[in-house]
Image (cartoon, grey):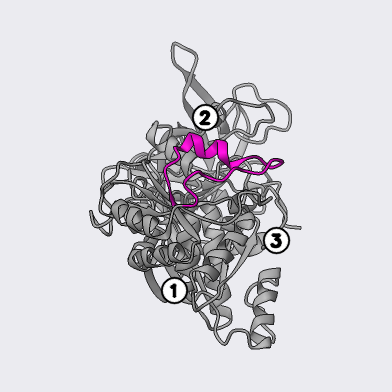
Amino acid sequence: MENSNIPSNFIKNIVIGDLESGKHKEIITRFPPEPNGYLHIGHAKSICLNFELASEFKGKTNLRFDDTNPVKEDTEYVESIKEDVKWLGFEWDNLYFASNYFDTMYEKAILLIKKGKAFVCDLSPEEMREYRGTLTEPGKESPYRNRSIEENLTLLEKMKNGDYKDGEKVLRAKIDMASPNLNMRDPIIYRISHTEHHNTGSKWCIYPMYDFAHPLEDAIEGITHSICTLEFEDHRPLYDWFVKECEMEAVPQQIEFARLNMTNTVMSKRKLKQLVDENYVDGWDDPRMPTVAGLRRRGFTPESIRNFCREIGVSKGHSLVDYRMLEHFIREDLKLKAPRTMGVLDPIKVVITNYPENESEVLTAAINPENPEMGDREITFSREIYIEREDFMEDPPKKYHRLYPGNEVRLRHAYFVKCNEFFKDEEGNITEIHCTYDPETKSGSGFTGRKVKGTIHWVDAKNCLPCEFRLYDSLILDSEEEKESFLENVSEDSLIIQNGYIEKNMENVKPQDKFQFLRHGYFNVDIKHSSEEKIVFNRIVSLKSSFRIK
């Protein structure tokens, strides 16, 4: 069976073997997020894996919300997850909620009690931890473990009816308190929580634990390959135990792979929520966040994220992926798509003293030299322009090829200009530069005279648009030092805001439009702060990186 849409990996090989052996006629996978936060780039890896695997073998993928903990879940997260999956380019075959199966789960809990495989326990959480034992010592059986089937059935019904307070009782599986796998030491199946549920309202006051609910959900939906991250490897015996003892008709196979870890970021919804709640960032979609919403707002494309996820691959081994690798793929995706333009982030005015006053001209330049089919754009040029402050120095070092007194440079798409004088304010800051231009050196005129070493970009001061540039850097500083909290590694310099100017021809840009600003990098029109009064650009990524795909 030849399939090459996605790179070969051990999970794909398992699927191929199952289809060839006749174990399965159709592959059914699922993406099962808990709606307790926004999805991040690690979830994107799982989304791509599940959806692309099923698609390649003409199978199906369900989107299922694992909403078994109403204390932390919210419909806001449900809607954001649906939006993210669609934005990444995937369509689910079925949309399910774990809460839709609560009646079936309760029936299976009763079945376990009737089989002598579950009991109601009154131990407090502290006592339960003491009874559990350690990795080297077996646990002790609960004094309530041998309650009769009739008593357990009565107590479970009273739990369901709301007769007990939160934490007063739990339902536990009866497995093996001496098992070397701590997950098999009589784990909790149901706990009491008098909490309104986003989907079922106040119907239930007991809720199933994830380890009990998840295998039943997979079996109910006929999932063939339940793909999860490595931290659930030790839970697999319990997963299989619940499927068997609950007498499920379908038997899913759990397969684990290494989760995504990246430099300069955190991959924990709990930590990301802390950044949001404590106002370190501008919400879940802050462009510095590794959330799918944050990457989208910053300007990453679905194609770049999907290509990144394919490239990093799937394995059993833990590794740390360089964030610059993700940046590589957005550069690759945008280099042929993004229009080129000029923007001055830290402006200083230049007056071209020998250019006629009250006159201007229109110059033309390629929208994207690497993609001629995009055509040309028009740029206005007049006596006064803005250049970058860093492109002028009063007393430059050697090999400085930009503008300085007596030096000549080319203005991109325009003329040669030579600096004659400059002016300062009382504090010594340069406020204005005076130059002369050579009208014979117009770009594209075929001028073959003298050469200049420097070329700088600019915008026409009389025909430009004011805008805000937001320059982002890593939110989390990598540190080998042990810190009490990850918040101690939050960078204070992860956002720099500059106010400058862009070409007049960009007056009709829309949120999420992407451009390459010459020398500065790729930018995206911000969807939250940009308006008709003021355009706000987020820098997606700089133009160059030392990172290389091996």
Q: How far from the left and from the top, in percent, is residue 289?
A: 48, 44
Q: Amino acid at mark 2?
A: Leu
Q: Which residue is the site of mark 1? A: 220
The correct choice, above or below, for 520 with respect to 495 in the image is: below
Q: Secondary structure at mark 1?
A: helix
Q: Residues within 10 Å of mark 3 (few under 14, many from 20)?
A: some
Q: Which residue is the site of mark 2? A: 487
The correct choice, above or below, for 15 with respect to 488 in the image is: below
In magenta, the rendered stretch is 120-146
Magenta part, dominant SS: loop
Q: Amino acid at mark 1?
A: Ile
Q: Residue at x 33, y 42 (%)?
A: 166
Of pointers 3 and 2, the one earlier in the residue sequence: 3
- Residue furthest out toward the top: 426
- Name the side, left or right, on which 456 lies relative to 203: right
Q: Are marks 3 and 2 in contact (CB under 8 Å)?
A: no
- Structural distance between the alpha carbons of marks 3 and 1: 28 Å
User: What is the number of the mark on residue 315?
Assistant: 3
- Name the side, left or right, on which 472 lies relative to 65: right
Q: How far from the left and from the top, in percent, is residue 261?
A: 62, 48
Q: Secondary structure at mark 3?
A: loop
